Amino acid sequence: MALSLRRGTVTAVLERQDGLARIEVDGTPCVAYPQLTGPVALGDEVVVNTQARDLALGSGGFDVLYLNLTRGLGLGGEPDAHVIKLPYTPGQFAALHVEELEGLDDSVLGGMPVVCCSLHSQVAPVCAALTRLRVAYVQLPGGALPLALSDAIRVLEERGLVGLTVSVGACFGGDLESVTPWSALAHVRSRGYEVAVVAIGPGIVGTASMYGHGGLAAVVAANAATALGGRPVVVARVSDADRRERHRGISHHTETILRLCFGDVLVADDEQGRGWQRACAGLPLSHMGRGPNEDPAFFAAAFAAGRLARGLVVPAGAPSE
């Protein structure tokens, strides 16, 4: 087990987004996270990690900038930050976390719905059903760790469908950082958000195990919501296009999630998915390379979960159950 690193020169800067730059190093696609490695410019001498592309991972197809030798040395850390992301690894860095920004009291979620996704591609249709509500997105480890890699979240923020992002554990780059999902959910509620949507980042790679994938992240989210007095809504993973028998209909991953949840969880029915096409129009919808026309059941099920969560929102000032 070793890092796969190579030196190179930035030959193109293709796109700059908040927290993300898409570049080319010696003509090869690469992504950079300026929050970690500093700004990047044409002609910079850099070191890139090539392993994901070398292994043809599902999130691969590009290298990741590891070190900018031209302008990335001697960068200062975040002031007053004491909690380390990726501790004791070559990529460790300090970031302010909600646990140290302010004391979290013992208040519970008061019935706040928490939508528990097992795949990042479920987030957009879930949020499409939550228009005009205050929605926070919470990202757990299990897929890509940098929140900035998600084009879907960027679009949802631009459209006002997500008002706050929180990156948990090893994830980074949200509006806020949190050590645990419990703290993230408590903080989201304390700021007046009405629904939390929890998922892993994009780029998940299959493990051929019922205990892999994003299913276990959905279990963690559901159990955290239950422990804090929230209402967990599990997004069913449904497909009518997948060639694999155990992925057609309601996937075995969903069955595993429901079996491992400690408390009662809710799952939407098919009727709640009605109208998903119109509500999701213009949103980035893609799952395993399939769009809404190729696998409509997948996106309909995610939208249905969002609609179910919408019906659970307790109006401000009303007593929770």
Image (cartoon, rainbow, N blue to C red):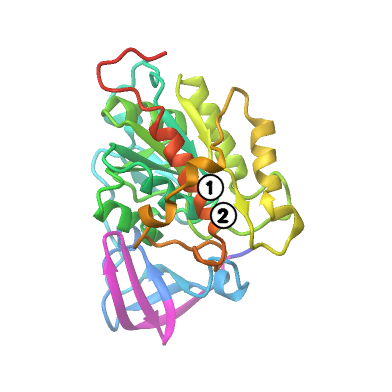
Residue, disc 2: 297
The quarter of the picture where residue 99 lies is top left
For this rendering, which residue is in front, 135 or 242? 242
Magenta stretch: give its range: 3-29
Residue 134: within the magenta?
Answer: no
The residue furthest right is 245
- Give the amino acid type for the residue marked by disc 1 in the picture: Ala
Question: Which type of secondary structure does the marked residue at label 1 adopt?
Answer: helix
Q: Is mark 2 on a helix, strand or loop?
A: helix
User: Mark 1 highlights which residue?
Assistant: 301
240, 290: nearer the viewer = 240
Image vertical order of residue 1 relative to residue 226, above or below: below
Give the percent coordinates (x, y) of residue 282: 34, 63
Where is residue 55 shown, x and y percent of the image?
63, 72
- Does the magenta run of residues contain 6? yes
Residue 58: quarter of image: bottom right
Q: Is residue 261 visible?
A: yes
Instruction: Report the residue at 55% width, 68% height from top.
Output: 289
Q: Distance between the residues labelled 1 and 2?
A: 6 Å
Left or right side of 162 for 111:
right
- Residue drawn at x 37%, y 26% is 186
Residue under the point 38% across and 34% down: 310
Q: Quadrant of the C terminus?
A: top left
**Viewport quadrant of the N terminus:** bottom right
Tag 2: residue type?
Ala
